Amino acid sequence: MFRYIIRRLGSLLATLVVASLIVFIVIEVVPGDPASFMLGLNAQPDTIAALRAELGLDVSKVQRYLSWVFGMVQGDFGQSYTYRTPVADMVGDRLWISLPLALYALALSTLIAFPAGIWAASRRGRFADSAVMGFTQLGIAVPNFWFALILVLVFAVNLGWFSAGGFVSWDAGFFASMKSLTLPAVALALPQAAILTRVMRSSLLDVMGEDYMRTARAKGLSERQALLRHALRNALIPVLTIIGLQFSFLIAGAIIIENVFFLPGLGRLIFQSIAQRDLIVVESVIMLLVFAVVIVTFLVDIAYAWVDPRLRHGVR
Amino acid sequence: MNWRSVVPGAFLLVVVIVGALCSFIWTPFDVAGLDIRNKMQTSSAIHWLGTDHLGRDILSMLMVGARTSLAVALVAVFIGMGVGVPLGLFAAARRNSWVDELIMRGNDLVFAFPALLIAIMITAVFGPSAINAIIAIGIFNIPVFARLTRGAAMSLWTREFIMAARVAGKGELRISYEHVLPNLTNLLIVQGTIQFSLGILAEAGLSYIGLGAQPPIPSWGRMLAESQTLITLAPHLALYPGLAIVFTVLGLNLLGDGLRDWLDPRLRRER
């Protein structure tokens, strides 16, 4: 197990290094110098040179890459070109909106998908099964930002239960903040819940064909008892993997959903920074999101290997 | 779910495709024609689905928007297949070689970037456009096809008819092309349909946040974005483009599920 973790850790580091190189190279070819962009058309060449020196743009690209990467490792994400504040502070504030949103959505989709998937599997081939499957088919086809618009129309405009957008600061109390994240989280959770329901159902049906399930029924358990007592635990392994993988979709989805609800999270930060040529912020936020995706994938791999020893040694 | 879902799936898709093709020759109204006096009308005999905030006919815009949606998603599928399938075939033919390792690690890397992040990076550099949306979605499709092809090709390489071809003296690449690839066609068609539908959703998302096709080219995602500020005044503006996306994606998914069962009964799965 230890050797497996070390090996996976090595490939995780390699992925991060290459990813940081790609992000740096891609963003660095952006036409236009940030310093001259900030100072406008009438800036004197020596003013531009001074600002370039202040922003650390006057050293070679290799040096800049290295200082960016080693800074990030130490938690220093550089300084925003536009606001002259540390990027880490800007990211920190917004992370407390984006991360709770993703986790909230993950929790919701799991809460919907588990009962729905179990129910459909236990009623296999009957009306309830077809109904659940029909809904999942629809849930996958509905774009989450459109679903978000419909939610706003119904629950904010017509019923007035929620506000149509914006975020209530955590200082105003936990429940007030969570309430302002509720519609975004529901919108984000819907397609994920539909996918997860299908995985839950098919995973349960796979397990129900196993010999030990026949034994469980033979010893007198009803279909439902056998399902809940024996099938569920074994069916959970693939389901947990999918939950981990969905995290990266939630991060990407959150970027769009934050824009629907005007939530000041990481997604909106990226767009503002692109518009303002604040490239250091763009680079750092993208790297942070990639880091989150890679770490979650790594944790899922480890958890999977822990549950299923065959994976530690076997071919991938 | 069985092969019969091909029928409703194909029906929905044909409606969308006919609408898109028809828009090349004829639309009920000119999509560039502004008619402010008749703005934000609801359905009527003249404007079947009403008009938007600039008085443009919604049905006409949906028809032209279908063109953008289908074209972006389809080309992105071809990019994914065109690059991913040869990579996967090559990796399977030289399995466990450094080439295989490199291809698979490269795939892991692309998986670490959600499609939207790729699109954001490309946009930050080259500016938003339909072409850049195609590239972003296409890049995301590459590892999907590479993995699928490699996995399926690997199991084919253990079969007798491949052994026979090797004994006959054919090279690895020729076997890949002449014997492995034809056996993957069904699988690739089915996955192509799935990626097509994901591409439609991705294109809608990108153009919604302004990273896709730029005005004046109508696109479903941007129609939704424009409707958002008017949602209290004219909710129907937010309804129809969304329904168009749902119909198209639903059609493709039903078609894909049905095709999987129809083309290869062995693949029939309880999903």
Image (spheres, helix red, strand yellow):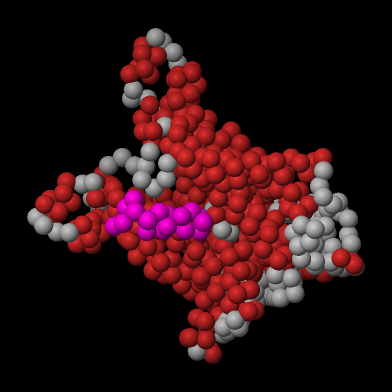
In the rendered image, the residue lying farthest to the top is B168
Residue lying furthest front: B45
Question: Toward which corner of the image does residue A127 lie, by quadrant?
Answer: bottom left
Q: Is residue B38 found inside the magenta-colored segment of the image? A: no
Magenta residues, dominant SS class? helix
Residue at the (60%, 46%) spot, across then down: B12
Q: Which residue extends farthest left?
A: A219
Residue B24 point in image, percent of width and height? 80, 41
Whole-percent x, y for residue B36 in the image = 89, 66
- Give the answer, above or below, for where B141 lies relative to A152: above
Judged left or right of residue B37, residue B179 is: left
Total count of labels: 0
Q: Is residue A257 above or below residue B217?
A: below
| Position of residue A197 in the picture relative to residue A49 (left or right) | left
**In-image side of B115 versus B225 (left or right):** left
* Residue at x 59%, y 55% (from the top left corner): B246
Where is residue B270 shown, x and y percent of the image? 36, 45
Q: Is residue B240 visible?
A: yes
Q: Is the C terminus of chain A in the top left, top right, bottom left or bottom right quadrant?
A: top left
- Residue A21 appearing in the image: no
Q: Is residue A129 magenta?
A: yes
Residue at 58% across, 33% down: B82
Task: Find the magenta span and give its range.
Answer: A122-140
Residue B8 image point, x, y percent: 54, 44
User: Is A4 situated left or right of B36 in this image?
Assistant: left
Residue at 80 percent across and 67 percent down: it is B40
Q: Quadrant of residue A132?
A: bottom left
